[in-house]
């Protein structure tokens, strides 16, 4: 399989995706302004997928755990915030929700992770499955299962640009633009945190080897609480943006599942990978739904990401930006 | 006890308490009639499933509290959570079957498809009020199915009639944004037939479960600019559709939801921006002051026995739908009791009761549902009973009727129903009953 795992395979895959993206223009299926709208819409959706994927990458990078509960954390955080806002102003509710997410991280570390130190990755993964189900149920039990409107002042009305240039103009959702700016800011902050702070370096050391990190005095338990807390805060940001768009409700955590193919594409350990993976998936699924949907019967948006992830697993399992893993046997 | 052991013990106690306290269980005695309540109070469809379930359960409670049951026979019921998943729905049905239920309401077209053969073998009447498979209106083939008050084919037909009144549909475009499931696909056949008849272009846009990803769908709508959009969604898909319509500036005035896509959970998340959105109402809307509501307030909520968390939810569109669905089961039981002279009737008796249901306006008024339910009269060859509806429109705060009564065109639909039922009978090797010989 070495043939498939060469770096240039990545460029071939990206090239194929690029050709696919521009194909509708040459196949005569699309007029340029409409195609551009789909591209912009896809990129904006991709940014939102990246936001959830960031939480996944963060925990994987720092603890080697693939956190299946990230979607449930997004829902739990958003539900907590929106219900608390019924009793207090937004700023206070935000602080209280952050505290709740830190508390959740602490409880997870005490009850789930600590007893599982030095266990296989698959054991920790299974534990996060349990956390996901527990958080799902707990969130709905405490906060209810209705659709709650989350208004944090995001603009709902789209803007039509270049009306004089193209008939009908190009529609841009301002809510998506603001979400993209927020996501970019978050990525910048996380990159700084990982590269420039001692805690960030400690997190990376723990990810490499639990025992080795402990032997040089890195407190594993504290590190896990920190990383799950940061991941909880990323989940809160994702929850705010998704919740503002879709309303806060159970399906938020299903949308968050899209983060899985995103990290497969981008690489489990790469923050830029989460961003690029999200953009490719967002763009690909929207273009294929609009231009292939009429021929294939629609519904492509739902499975495109997973099929693409399968292709990447076959040809480049470490993802676009992931570190190649070589085991000495 | 160490701290970690204490925590474990507390968690175990909490789990046991939750399991015991959360379940709403009732065991049917020999002098009671058992009705299973298949619901979804959690998951992606809970916002719509919860009010229906509350309305259904509250009406059964009301009959027990106010009247001491149906002619003195109490109704026992038990909820089972399906999550709107067909496999879990079938599991619920199989689990509760041993309690000898007389009727089942699955609240899912997918589960209805899965149960259609089972109920005939188990002799349990399958009530699908306002949903289910449309061809099951033909009782000669579907003896155990009761899609009362209106099928999806009737709904699609009435919607086309309504928009056709605004001007000829020739050369126009109608898009159907539908839940990609048996439910969402139901109206396609009728809309295809209508597109041929009226000369409009019919655009099909499926949305996959649970329906939160619709950006591409609505970009297609922006590009193709249909004159009308019919929405056949459920749960969060509906509110997402309305939000995406806002995001691409598609006029809500040109949107029409089926009766499962036009309730409060569908429009409230979009708030004032949903203003002007229309839906076809299954005879009722969000009436709150009918005598039945007053009875429910008096006998249940004033005594702390109501099911909904908040009394203000009584009268919401889906709450009313649940209440009406329960009422039709209760009246079928009553009808069965009158025929058999038995207090505790069987599923077979209730099937007869549902097939010979006759609720004229006076009876509906006496039941407290005046202006919410149209007169219903079923027969062997008509398990639908009535096929009338109105359009209601969201004004930003509430629903209000904005059309006269519409009636589905039986002449147009009957041959379609008969052909589809015949094909089903041939596939399943069912010999259709001769309805002229049925009493």
Image (cartoon, grey):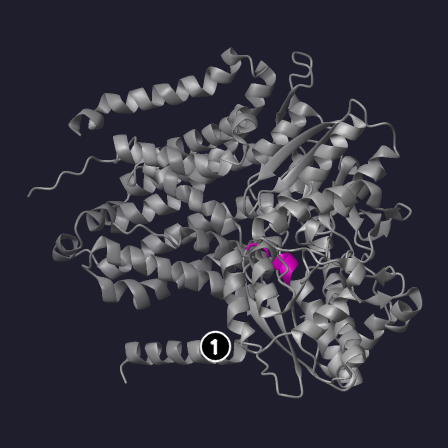
Task: Name the quarter where the C terminus of chain A is drawn.
Answer: top left
The residue lying toward the viewer, choosing from B250 and B372, is B372
Element marked by disc 1:
helix
Q: Report x, y in % for residue A172.
A: 61, 27
Q: Residue at x 48, y 66 (%)?
A: A138
Magenta residues, dominant SS class: helix
- From the viewer's perspective, tell me whether residue B31 is left or right of residue A281: right
Q: Residue at x 81, y 56 (%)?
A: B285
The residue lying toward the viewer, choosing from B424 and A195, is B424
Residue A27 drawn above or below residue A101: above
- From the viewer's perspective, tell me whether residue A278 is left or right of residue B289: left
Q: Which residue is mark 1?
A: B19
Q: Report x, y in % for residue B372.
A: 85, 61
Please tell me in which quadrant of the rendered image residue B317 appears.
bottom right
Give the extent of the magenta segment: B44-49
Using the image, name the chain to which the residue with label 1 belongs.
Answer: B
- From the viewer's perspective, tell me whether residue B19 is left or right of residue A262: right
Q: Report x, y in % for residue A217.
A: 15, 57
Magenta span contains residue B48: yes
Q: Residue at x 78, y 22 (%)?
A: B171
The residue lying toward the viewer, choosing from B273 and B105, is B105
């Amino acid at each position: 399989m070495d043939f498939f795992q060469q770096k240039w395979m990545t460029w071939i895959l990206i090239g194929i995706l690029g050709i696919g993206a521009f194909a509708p223009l040459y196949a005569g299926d699309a007029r340029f302004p409409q195609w551009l709208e789909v591209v912009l819409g896809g990129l904006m959706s991709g940014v939102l997928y990246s936001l959830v994927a960031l939480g996944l990458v963060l925990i994987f990078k720092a603890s080697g755990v693939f956190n299946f509960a990230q979607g449930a954390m997004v829902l739990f955080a958003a539900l907590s915030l929106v219900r608390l806002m019924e009793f207090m102003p937004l700023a206070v509710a935000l602080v209280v929700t952050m505290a709740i997410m830190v508390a959740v991280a602490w409880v997870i570390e005490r009850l789930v992770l600590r007893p599982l130190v030095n266990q296989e990755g698959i054991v920790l993964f299974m534990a996060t499955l349990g956390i996901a189900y527990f958080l799902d149920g707990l969130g709905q039990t405490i906060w209810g299962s209705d659709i709650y409107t989350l208004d944090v002042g995001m603009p709902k009305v789209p803007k039509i640009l270049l009306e004089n240039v193209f008939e009908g103009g190009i529609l841009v959702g301002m809510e998506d633009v603001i979400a993209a700016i927020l996501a970019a800011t978050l990525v910048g902050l996380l990159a700084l945190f990982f590269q420039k702070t001692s805690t960030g370096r400690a997190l990376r050391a723990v990810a490499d080897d639990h025992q080795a990190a402990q032997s040089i005095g890195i407190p594993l338990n504290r590190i896990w609480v920190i990383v799950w807390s940061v991941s909880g805060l990323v989940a809160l940001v994702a929850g705010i943006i998704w919740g503002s768009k879709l309303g806060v409700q159970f399906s938020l955590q299903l949308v968050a599942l899209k983060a899985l193919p995103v990290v497969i594409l981008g690489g489990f350990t790469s923050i830029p990978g989460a961003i690029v993976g999200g953009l490719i998936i967002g763009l690909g699924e929207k273009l294929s739904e609009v231009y292939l949907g009429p021929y294939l019967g629609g519904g492509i948006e739902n499975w495109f990401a997973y099929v693409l992830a399968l292709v990447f697993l076959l040809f480049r399992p470490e993802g676009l930006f992931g570190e190649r893993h070589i085991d000495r046997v | 006890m160490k701290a970690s052991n204490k925590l474990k013990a507390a968690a175990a106690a909490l789990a046991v308490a939750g399991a015991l306290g959360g379940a709403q269980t009732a065991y049917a005695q020999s002098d009671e009639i058992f009705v299973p309540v298949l619901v979804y109070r959690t998951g992606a469809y809970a916002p719509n499933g919860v009010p229906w379930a509350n309305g259904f359960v509250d009406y059964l409670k009301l009959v027990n509290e106010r009247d001491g049951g149906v002619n003195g026979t109490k109704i026992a019921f038990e909820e089972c959570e399906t999550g709107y998943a067909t496999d879990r729905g079938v599991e619920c049905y199989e689990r509760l079957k041993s309690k000898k239920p007389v009727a089942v309401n699955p609240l899912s077209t997918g589960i209805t498809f899965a149960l259609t053969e089972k109920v005939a073998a188990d002799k349990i009447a399958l009530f699908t009020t306002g949903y289910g498979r449309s061809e099951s209106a033909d009782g000669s083939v579907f003896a155990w199915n009761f899609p009362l008050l209106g099928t999806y084919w009737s709904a699609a037909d009435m919607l086309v009639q309504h928009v056709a009144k605004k001007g000829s549909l020739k050369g126009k475009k109608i898009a159907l944004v539908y839940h990609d499931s048996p439910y969402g696909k139901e109206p396609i056949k009728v809309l295809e037939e209508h597109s041929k008849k009226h000369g409009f272009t019919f655009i099909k846009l499926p949305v996959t479960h649970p329906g939160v990803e619709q950006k591409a769908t609505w970009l297609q709508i922006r590009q193709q600019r249909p004159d009308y959009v019919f929405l056949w969604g459920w749960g969060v898909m509906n509110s997402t559709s309305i939000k995406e319509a806002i995001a691409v500036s598609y006029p809500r005035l040109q949107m029409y939801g089926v009766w499962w896509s036009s309730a409060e959970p569908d429009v409230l998340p979009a708030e004032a921006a949903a203003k002007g959105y229309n839906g076809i109402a299954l005879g009722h809307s969000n009436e709150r002051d009918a005598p039945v509501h007053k009875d429910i307030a008096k006998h249940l909520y004033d005594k702390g026995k109501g099911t909904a968390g908040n009394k203000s939810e009584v009268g919401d569109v889906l709450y009313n739908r649940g209440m009406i669905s329960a009422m039709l089961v209760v009246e079928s039981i009553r009808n069965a009791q009158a025929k058999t002279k038995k207090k505790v009737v069987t599923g077979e008796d209730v099937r007869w009761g549902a097939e010979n249901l006759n609720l004229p306006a006076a009876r509906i008024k006496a039941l407290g549902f005046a202006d919410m339910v149209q007169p219903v009269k079923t027969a062997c060859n008509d398990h639908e009973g009535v096929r009338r509806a109105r359009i209601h429109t969201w004004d930003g705060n509430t629903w209000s009727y904005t059309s006269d009564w519409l009636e589905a065109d039986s002449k147009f639909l009957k041959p379609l129903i008969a052909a589809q039922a015949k094909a089903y009978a041939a596939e399943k090797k069912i010999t259709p009953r001769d309805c002229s010989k049925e009493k």
